[in-house]
């Protein structure tokens, strides 16, 4: 089978041609605005003007005739509407003219599958970093699911916007990377990680405020060190949560050598492996669209022309995957956490836990030391505070700058417990969790990392642990992120029980703040894509 794929979600028009075993062609052309960012209609006009030229180049590179094509694939979303409509129209015309099947595919999944194809990764956690998208994605129960993502703008857009403020033309990311190599001073910037989600808007605003006051090279260096440490942290947290040992880097920002170095350092510390595809398939390209289309067509998944409307906010986790993904999960004693080393000890005959936040080699010292110290202090304080609201949390026996010795809560994590629970038991547990979270929120405390791995179940008893990401004086946004994070964690890791999640919201509605629930819907609606 020979499949032609057309990419056109944003600034790049690309046409790729693939077989089951080889990329035959991969031709791209990028729209570069004379000033400012991407103008969707101008980008779409660029794609339309360049299409015939790119098609001819791809056929020449593949050394085939257009009539050798046996299937057409196109990027159905997510992306910029005018650009998506342009490539969808071109795909429909080719499908009808050649009388071959057509399939619209998800751009994000295309990055993941071409990465698996070109690197040999089996079941990775993918860090997808591009202009409009920043997500942590991995396979679970028949779909690729989002385990973490940006709460505002994509990493690529953030770098491009910073570059524009510095007078650097689009695309700014590669130039920021070069400038950062000459940076010598770290300028403290907001480090905003919320569980497995991240936020770049505060970082961007703070960095812009330093323009004209600090060397541009130092600003670039500080932004990269901060943003990439955040990305590496949430990727490691996903590895720990999912018990996986492969990381796949994808998207245009994946070519950044500093980001690659940070991730490589992290995976080596965990005994895992990093896969980075060739640069030409990291960026938006037609080969990845063709390859994903080929996989669907091989499994007899195709579309009628009337089904090929674009989906501008096409969710990664909305796509059923009909092929097998070989599971690659590691379970072993003392599985390293994302932040700390947990050891069991004895204190006067009692079982206790020592939680020590270890230095992370991928983070520079000013970021690493301050994070470990602040998170340890915050965790101890909040862990003590929530007991006043009737919430089961560990008793603290001793506290050091980067270590807490605490009670070992009996039971197992909700993550490990759910497979062995019936629906009634799950409902009872998540209703109690909702009441606990509502009580915390009533006292303006947000947990900040509310996943099923940070909840302990012992019969009908529920305990909450790991308050290092928590917030005091939390506002509506931080509280809503708690609910959103629990929802996404539950859906991603326990999709077969996701139909029960309304019980969680129902209980929170009875005991919590309706403004928080409304903000959850706003967070869902932001859905990032450009």
Image (cartoon, rainbow, N blue to C red):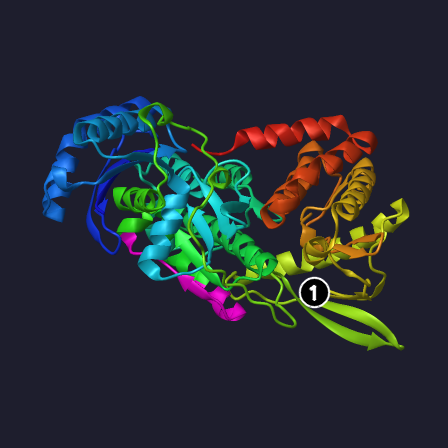
State the residue in front, 280 or 297.
Answer: 297
Query: Could you tell me if residue 256 is visible in this image?
Result: no
Picture quadrant where residue 517 is located: top right
Task: Residue 202 in the image: state x and y as whole percent.
Answer: 55, 39
Asked if residue 187 lies left or right of residue 254, the reply is right
Residue tagged 1: 402
Q: Per the image, is 502 magenta?
A: no
Q: Is residue 412 above or below residue 3?
A: below
Residue at point 17%, 32% (across, down): 98
State the residue in front, 219 or 193.
Answer: 193
Disc 1 is placed on an element classified as loop
Q: Per the image, is 266 magenta?
A: yes
Asked if residue 391 lies left or right of residue 5, the reply is right
Residue range in magenta is 264-279
Query: Could you tell me if residue 283 is visible in this image?
Result: yes
Residue at point 47%, 48% (across, down): 223
Picture quadrant where residue 116 is located: bottom left
Task: Residue 457 in the image: state x and y as whole percent.
Answer: 79, 55
Q: Residues within 10 Å of mark 1 (few under 14, many from 20)?
A: many
Q: Is residue 398 above or below residue 129?
A: below
Picture quadrant where residue 15 is located: top left
Of the 4 image quadrants, the one containing the C terminus is top left
Task: Residue 307 in the image: state x and y as whole percent.
Answer: 37, 26
């Amino acid at each position: 089978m020979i499949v032609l794929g057309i990419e056109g979600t944003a600034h790049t028009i690309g046409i790729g041609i693939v077989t089951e075993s080889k990329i035959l062609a991969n031709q791209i052309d990028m729209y570069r605005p004379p000033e400012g960012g991407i103008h969707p209609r101008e980008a779409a006009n660029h794609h339309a003007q360049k299409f015939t030229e790119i098609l001819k180049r791809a056929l020449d590179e593949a050394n085939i005739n257009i009539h050798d094509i046996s299937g057409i694939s196109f990027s159905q979303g997510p992306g910029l509407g005018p650009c998506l409509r342009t490539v969808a129209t071109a795909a429909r015309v080719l499908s009808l003219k050649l009388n071959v099947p057509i399939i619209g595919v998800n751009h994000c999944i295309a990055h993941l599958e071409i990465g698996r194809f070109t690197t040999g990764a089996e079941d990775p956690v993918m860090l997808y970093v591009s202009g409009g998208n920043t997500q942590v994605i991995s396979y679970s129960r028949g779909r690729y699911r989002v385990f973490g993502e940006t709460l505002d703008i994509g990493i690529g857009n953030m770098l491009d916007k910073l570059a524009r403020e510095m007078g650097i033309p689009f695309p700014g990311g590669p130039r920021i990377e070069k400038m950062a190599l000459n940076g010598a001073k770290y300028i403290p910037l907001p480090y905003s990680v919320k569980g497995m989600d991240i936020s770049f808007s505060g970082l961007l605003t703070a960095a812009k405020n330093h323009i004209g006051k600090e060397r541009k090279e130092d600003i670039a260096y500080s932004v990269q060190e901060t943003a990439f440490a955040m990305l590496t942290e949430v990727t490691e947290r996903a590895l720990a949560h999912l018990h996986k040992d492969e990381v796949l880097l994808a998207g245009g920002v994946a070519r950044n050598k500093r980001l690659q170095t940070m991730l490589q350092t992290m995976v080596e510390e965990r005994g895992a492996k990093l896969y980075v595809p060739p640069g030409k398939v990291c960026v938006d390209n037609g080969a990845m669209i063709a390859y994903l289309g080929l996989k669907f067509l091989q499994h007899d998944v195709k579309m009628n022309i009337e089904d090929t409307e674009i989906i501008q906010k096409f969710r990664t986790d909305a796509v059923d995957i009909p092929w097998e993904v070989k599971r690659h999960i590691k379970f072993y004693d003392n599985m390293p956490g994302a932040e700390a080393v947990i050891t069991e000890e004895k204190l006067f005959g009692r079982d206790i836990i020592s939680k020590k936040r270890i230095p992370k080699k991928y983070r520079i010292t000013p970021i690493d030391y301050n994070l470990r110290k602040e998170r340890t202090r915050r965790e101890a304080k909040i862990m003590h505070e929530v007991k006043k609201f009737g919430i089961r949390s560990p008793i603290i026996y001793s506290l050091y700058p980067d270590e807490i010795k605490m009670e070992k809560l009996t039971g197992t994590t909700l993550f490990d417990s759910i497979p062995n629970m019936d629906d009634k038991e799950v409902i009872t547990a998540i209703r109690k969790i909702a009441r606990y979270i509502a009580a915390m929120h009533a006292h303006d405390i947000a947990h900040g990392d509310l996943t099923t791995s940070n909840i302990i179940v012992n019969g009908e008893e529920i305990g909450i642990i790991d308050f290092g990401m928590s917030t005091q004086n939390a506002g509506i946004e931080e509280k809503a992120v708690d609910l959103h994070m629990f929802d996404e964690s539950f859906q991603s890791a326990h999709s077969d029980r996701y139909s029960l999640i309304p019980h969680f919201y129902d209980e929170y509605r009875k005991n919590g703040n309706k403004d928080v629930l409304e903000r959850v819907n706003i967070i869902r609606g932001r859905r990032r894509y450009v």
